[in-house]
Image (cartoon, grey):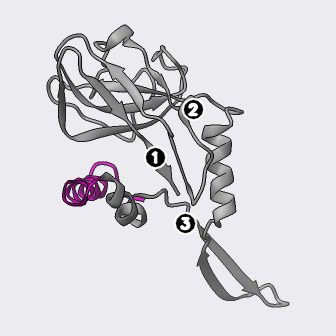
Amino acid sequence: MFNRLSGFDQAAEYARKVVHEFGYTVAKTILKPVMKMAFCNPIQAEVFNEANQLVSTHYAYNGIVDQGMNLLLDTFFDNGTTYTWWMGLIEGSGAQTLADSDIAGTHAGWAVSEFHTGATRQSWTGALGAAATRSISNTTTLDFAFTTTQTIHGIFIINHATADTGTEFLWSTAPFSTEVTVNNGDTLKITYTVSG
């Protein structure tokens, strides 16, 4: 898996360039092998003889089959049997630092934006379609309407509609390739896809 603060940044920069050059729809296909969840886990097998002496050691890495990945995505995100997930916005004023160590209620490098209409998070779970071809996505955009001019740095996914106190679970954060300026009357429409 990419390190969030080094290799991840390199991969994210590559992704931004691909999206800029080819557009979002084509980029999703091109970038899938780079940005997908790893789930490539090591397996070790050791052979011992009758005297309990190690004869050989063998290694492998599992691959998750399509059915297994679709089940994981459906169960964890779409069915709501575990959590209901909400999308919020990250404020874009000033420098922002997103890190793997961020948790709900403790993310000193960035702030939650509360300047869109009603400061309401959008239900990502409620907009999801069923997992297919190893990915899951909201089938309708999550729309954030603005009544003032604001700068938005990115998005976050959390399992609570309003709270960010530390008892919730933060799933992911994502900075936009460039900070997004929205004006009074603008609507920010967002699609988020998780692939494995």
Q: Amino acid at mark 2?
A: Thr
Q: Are marks 2 and 3 in contact (CB under 8 Å)?
A: no
Magenta-colored span: 1-23
At numbered mark 1, what does the secondary structure look like: helix, strand or loop?
Answer: strand
Residue 106: mark in rendering: none
Q: Is residue 12 magenta?
A: yes
Q: Point out residue 63 in the picture as x, y percentages from the top left corner.
A: 60, 70
Is 6 a magenta residue? yes
Q: Residue furthest right?
A: 50
Closer to the camera in the image, 73 or 105: 73
Q: Residue at x 60, y 39 (%)?
A: 77
Q: Earlier in the sequence, mark 2 or mark 1?
A: 2
How far from the left and from the top, in percent, is residue 90? Answer: 30, 26
Q: Amino acid at mark 3?
A: Cys
Residue at 68 percent across and 37 percent down: it is 79
Please provide percent x and percent y for residue 122. 46, 23
Left or right relative to 127: residue 68 = right
Disc on the earlier residue, 1 or 3: 3
Q: Amino acid at mark 1?
A: Thr
The secondary structure that dominates the magenta segment is helix
* Tag shown at residue 193: 1
Q: Label 3: which residue?
A: 40
Q: Is residue 165 above or below residue 60?
A: above
Marks 2/3: CA–CA distance: 26 Å
